[in-house]
Amino acid sequence: MDMPPSRYRVVEQGRRLVVIDTLAGRSVTPPAIASRPEMPSDRPRTMEAPRLQAPHRPPLGKPEPRGRYVGGEGFSFTTAPWFDKEGPRTIRIGTDGQGQLVGALMVALVVMIFLVAFIGWWIVFALVFVGLNAKARDGFRTAATTWLTAIDSTPN
């Protein structure tokens, strides 16, 4: 069974496409558009320059202090019991400890890059298994506690 013929037919008249209603025998006119939505290009343009805000000027003198307990001489953080045997405690790190902390982080980053790049990604699995060993984990916690106590500049 074939489909019935379409009611509408599109033809070209005078280089324009026209829809013709085959039942009425005349062209279909589109409904009048009452109001079309406002487009951004319809708005009149104004020649006002954007208003400049006052530039933010940093305060003169010393920079703002870093850390909760320090007057610009260093920073502090609170340890957790999973890596510090004496934790939780607040470690105050002075300028000397900051240099030591940055140096230790850089050495750890270089060692990890070397291990992954030259030995292979499987070394990460081996380090995970070493970390899961209770004796090895206890040794790491002891070493971390000793190191954190050494860089702590809190007066005793």
Image (cartoon, rainbow, N blue to C red):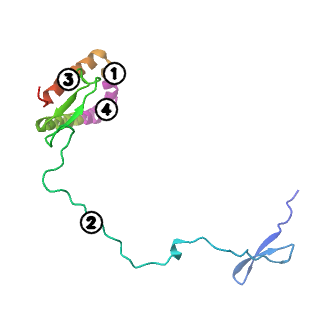
Q: Which residue is mark 2?
A: 54
Q: Residue at x 49, y 78 (%)?
A: 44
4 and 2 marks in contact (CB < 8 Å): no
Give whichever of discs 3 and 2 has the lower sequence position: 2
Q: Quadrant of residue 2?
A: bottom right
Foreground label between 4 and 2? 2
Report the predominant secondary structure element of the magenta stretch.
helix
Q: Which residue is mark 1?
A: 129
Give whichever of discs 1 and 4 has the lower sequence position: 4
3 and 1 marks in contact (CB < 8 Å): no
Q: Which residue type carries mark 3?
A: Thr
Q: Residue at x 73, y 74 (%)?
A: 31
Foreground label between 3 and 1? 3
Give whichever of discs 4 and 2 has the lower sequence position: 2
> What secondary structure is found at the residue carrying circle 4?
loop
Q: Which residue type carries mark 2?
A: Ala
Residue in the foreground of this view, choosing between 145 and 2: 145
Point out residue 134 in the picture as x, y percentages from the top left corner: 30, 16
Tell me the distance, in whole angstroms, between the alpha carbons under discs 4 and 2. 54 Å
Foreground label between 3 and 2? 2
Query: Measured along the vertical axis of the image, is residue 145 above or below residue 52?
Result: above
Is residue 115 shown in magenta? yes
Q: Residue at x 70, y 80 (%)?
A: 16
The quadrant the N terminus occupies is bottom right
Left or right relative to 91: residue 123: right
Q: Which residues are magenta?
A: 111-129
Q: Residue furthest right?
A: 1
Q: Which residue type carries mark 1?
A: Phe
Q: Which mark is residue 120?
A: 4
